[in-house]
Amino acid sequence: MSYFFVMRRVVTLILYLSLIVAGLYLNLWIYQTQTGARFTVLMVGSFLVLFGGYMLWTNFLSRHRGFD
């Protein structure tokens, strides 16, 4: 495997994991505060977790990976 292929996978893995972590942070920490935008924060956090998880699944965990 070439260097750029490996680095592209490393960068995308970091990006997908950061999406999941940011979504979990929004859902678990900010949503618990008593702000007026609780529903919006919940929806954005849920979207980030689901989108990051979906991209992580399709590119790294499934049998038919996107980079192969």
Image (cartoon, rainbow, N blue to C red):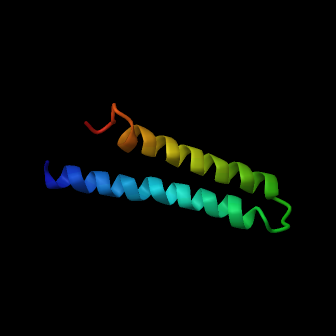
**18 relative to 55, above or below:** below
Q: Residue furthest left?
A: 2
User: Percent x, y for residue 9?
Assistant: 30, 51
Total numbered badges shown on the rendered structure: 0
Q: Quadrant of residue 62?
A: top left
Q: Quadrant of residue 61?
A: top left
Asked if residue 57 is positioned above or below residue 26 in the image, the reply reads above
Position of 44 with respect to 40 (left or right) is left
Q: Is residue 20 left or right of residue 11?
A: right
Residue at 58% x, 44% y is 50
On the image, the x and y values in percent for residue 57 come to 44, 41
What's the residue at 58%, 61% (across, down)? 22
Left or right of residue 4, residue 34 in this image:
right
Task: Place residue 11 in its image quadrant.
Answer: bottom left
Point out the image quarter for the C terminus. Answer: top left
Q: Position of residue 51 (x, y in %)?
A: 54, 44
What residue do we see at 84% from left, 65% from top?
35
Nearer to me, 15 or 63: 63
Looking at the image, which residue is at 22% across and 53% down? 6
**Horizontal side, residue 23 vs residue 62: left or right:** right
**In x, y percent, where is residue 31?**
76, 61
